[in-house]
Image (cartoon, coloured by chain):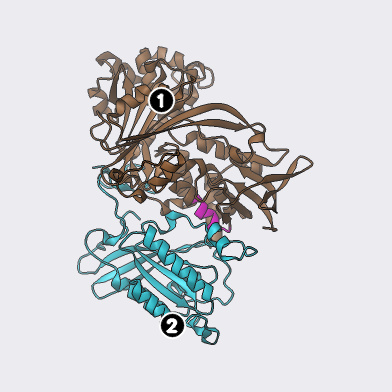
Amino acid sequence: MASRGQPQRPNGSGQSKICQFKLVLLGESAVGKSSLVLRFVKGQFQEYQESTIGAAFLTQTVCLDDVTVKFEIWDTAGQENIFLILPSFCRYLRYHSLAPMYYRGAQTAIVVYDISNAESFQRAKAWVKELQRQASPNIVIALAGNKADLANKRMVDADEAQVYAEENGLLFMETSAKTAMNVNEIFLAIAKKLPKSEQGGGGAATQGGARVVDINKPANNSGGGGCCK
Amino acid sequence: MNEEYDVIVLGTGLKECILSGMLSVSGRKVLHMDRNKYYGGESASLTPLESLFSKFEQSDTNEKFGRGRDWNVDLIPKFIMANGQLVKLLIHSGVTRYLEFKVVEGSFVYKGGSVYKVPADEKEALATSLMGLFEKRRFRKFLLFVMDFKQDDPSTWQGTNPKSTTMNEVYKKFGLSSGTADFTGHALGLHLDDEYLNAACGDTIQRIKLYYESLSHYGKSPYLYPLYGLGELPQGFARLSAIYGGTYMLDKPIEELVMENGVVVGVKSEGEVARAKCVICDPSYCSNRAKKVGQAVRAICLLNHPIPKTNNASSCQIIIPQNQVGRKSDMYICSVSFTHNVCSKGWYLAIVSTTVETDNAEAELKPALDLLGSIEKKFIAVSDIYEPSDDGQESKVFISKSYDATTHFETTCNDIVDMYRRVTGSEFDFAKVQKDLETVEQ
């Protein structure tokens, strides 16, 4: 993943360039983060999705006119969880155990809340603040009000979320992983908004000195041997 | 918390996180807690810079250091051997996908008051002023012997025996001077002291082979370093553990281990007891079951220039063999910089470390600190090194050893492999990790 955020040209000219971006999901437990990804990547939905176990690292591409955007999608692996027997808000913050490495170098984030859960919207705002403080300054943030199919249990007003998103420069859509409403659309909107320059793609590119190496490659196979300077 | 776990792990240092990851992948139910708000315990990289200042109870952080959050300062300096066990673990577990690495630009050794580059290839070996012309030929013969050496093939032993011939005898056999032996045992074999001279040569030959095999991967030095600091390593393995069902709690005070008839049954935290069949922890969570075996001293130095005489390397290691400065144990300098996203632009970090031998630990570091040029800010940490007082077979409390003064992760991995065997009763098998991963991912 050494070339994250940088355009690669596939073999043979004439094809569009591919830009790869790290996308992270944030939001309270059970708002449907994994479900959104599952719908986007595999077109599937499971009503009783268990807490995220197993594959928490997926990729999916979106084709724009002149460029293919490849998302490297990081799911939280349940590390946003706290113990359910300690439900109060301050406890939540205390046991928040998501590692900084998770959103480090992320060029884009989808912050998810559940429209039928008011507290999850407050948590989403806290995540946006955290990203503005900790993540790359150019990060593209999208706010997703998920479970839009549960309109009869709505606790978060769509207009209120829209105003909040505009004030903070976020993309905003209400989505439903269940009905697939706006799922592809929100990823597409992100793909369009991401900077696809020749240099660095807007992420926290590494500075100067030696190049990054791929340790998965066997010895002396790094194409031309050199890796430094 | 009132659930029952297979394993409770306390502390999110690298050893604990790797074990947690391996155990979760193998299907065990793991609860992993840390009293700190951050991952990594002793092996964390502190960020922002202000948290480093406050850890050392200093408040005079200064604008000249740039943005505090551009800093990720390792508390324990180490580099990763390109062909070592940790890289195998990273690859087999897939944790590499969360990390990015750069090759350390140079490895240097201190001799007679000066710093020399450790020759990385034949050309450098012929040009080095580390040794004279005839000594170079003898050394070359020795190296060829080492590279051909196979522990299980006596025809490669050239009359030595890896289990009985001492390393001293091997040096004599090849006619190497004590200066060359110093260089070989400490800068290539990475021994901390001279005890190895009278031990069987097999281990040292293996170490020199590891050095050169690692060197041959990328050419400049045998070492790798992860962007954003070593603290990324425990985070990566914690993520692996979480992906396979491990539960994480940070900032969680631990009151005590709950014992019944001398066997651990759980951990008490904030008045609640989480039950488990065994506990894995670092010595700080269980000081009554660990014994102090020594001290390490480390000086974290903030520089606004590369270390002099290292060809402006943005990262390097300098080894100061004990004999060169009249000590019993070696001193190490590990240097990284803003090019590894651990400092703000234009800054360098140099961490000096050694095993404490006197009452004035800071003074012991002088020969190394003198090599660094001007130092903008220096933090000195003296830490006790603990080992478990028993193997945990009866109590089911398995305690890791503190991180020693060695400059790479080989002893760290040895401890992990050993703990895994004691915890699970089966040998650690790198290939099996991968197989377990594939099974789960299907």
Q: Which chain is brown?
A: B
Q: Which chain is indicated by disc 2?
A: A
Q: Nearer the viewer, residue A24 or B159?
A: A24
Going 27% across and 38% down the picture, which residue do you hit?
B304
Q: Nearer the viewer, residue A17 or A31?
A: A31
Q: Which residue is mark 1?
A: B331
Q: Indicate the colour of chain A.
A: cyan
Can see residue B124? yes
Local packing at callout 2 (Cα closer than 10 Å; few below 14, some 14-19, many 20+) is some
Amino acid type at circle 1 is: Met
Going 34% across and 26% down the picture, which residue do you hit?
B369
Disc number placed over residue B392 in the picture, else none: none
Q: Quadrant of the N terminus of chain A?
A: bottom left
The Cα atoms of the two marked residues, 2 and 1, are separated by 62 Å
Magenta region: B237-245
Disc number placed over residue A158 in the picture, else none: 2
Question: Where's residue B440, x and y in %?
Answer: 56, 59
